[in-house]
Amino acid sequence: MKWLYEMFPAEGDNAQLSYGYSVSKVLFSERSEYQQVDVIENPVYGKALFLDRLMMTTEKDEFIYHELLTHVPASRIDGPQRALIIGGGDGGIARELCRYSSIKEVIVAEIDGMVIDASRKFLPKIACGFDDPRVKIQLGDGAAFVANQPDNSFDLVLVDSTEPIGPGITLYKEKFYRECCRVLKDNGQFSAQGLAPFIHEESQNLMNQTLKKAFNWVKPYMGVIPTYPTSLWLFFHAAKKAQDIDDISYTRLPNGTKYLTKELLRSCYNIPRFVETNLGN
């Protein structure tokens, strides 16, 4: 049986860890202008999307990542109406945002149209968010798109990015975070995936400190995602105004979530001490 291996660190020839997935079937394998795009079938996790041979999402556990990135910030807002997703080419974040009846528009700013097309064809349970008429696709550089948006124009900005390599590196810069803060409404909320604590310690520390230069309030939170390296995965929640993490309206959490419960929505902010140390908190 053929195997697909992802390597960490992902750049260069200095990999120290490898995760392997047996390939029952290759559904799609092409190189776009930006990256290698693969969709495979695995006996355990079902259909899976890889970008530059790094696991992005699988049918079996995708809901964990997508719910955490979406609902932790979105549940802070009473009736969010307008949201911007940077990245998000698999459609999972758009799907979760469309659970909110108050949402009027979701813009997906994705640089690689091939990721969207492959996801819609081969991962329809994830990419179904693109079928909602409230979702608008904006192909191109997400950082450039944010820079051209008016002040105070979004309730939510969610960064569903790859690792800080290749086309995704601009999404970890202070300038980008400042633009994200600028386009948020006064009560707006920001979230971004924050990598693996056991692998990306330096990147996480830098990301934490950079976010604090752009936002008045930054809070890390965490989830367990089986197909992500080491399973532990960090996220960052940020806002223009300080948030009371004990003051959560749990009724805002949409029905039908598979990972998040009312209890987890609060407890996900309780991160291990070694992660706090890594972040310099």
Image (cartoon, rainbow, N blue to C red):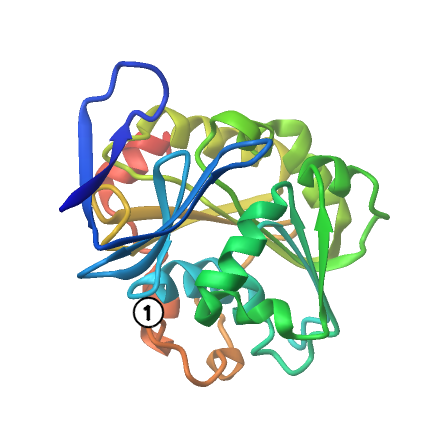
Residue 123 vertical placement versus 230 (above, below): below
User: In this orientation, which residue lies closer to the viewer: 118 or 103?
Assistant: 118
Residue lying farthest right? Answer: 150
Q: Going 51% across and 54% down the picture, which residue do you hit?
A: 118
Q: Is residue 157 left or right of residue 254?
A: right
**Within 10 angstroms of label 1, few (less than 14), some, or many (20 or more) residues?**
some
Q: Going 60% across and 74% down the picture, which residue do you hit?
A: 98
Question: Where is residue 33 shown, x and y percent of the image?
Answer: 60, 31
Residue lying farthest top? Answer: 13
Quadrant for residue 211, please give it: top right
Q: Is residue 208 left or right of residue 109?
A: left
Q: Going 55% across and 58% down the picture, which residue do you hit?
A: 243
Q: Is residue 254 left or right of residue 41?
A: right
Question: Where is residue 129 shown, x and y percent of the image?
Answer: 58, 70
User: In this orientation, which residue lies closer to the viewer: 5 or 30?
Assistant: 30
Question: Where is residue 71 shown, x and y percent of the image?
Answer: 49, 67
Residue type beneath disc 1: Leu
Q: Name the residue under label 1.
A: 264
**Element at label 1:** helix
- Asked if one can make out residue 230 in the rendered structure from this viewpoint, the answer is yes
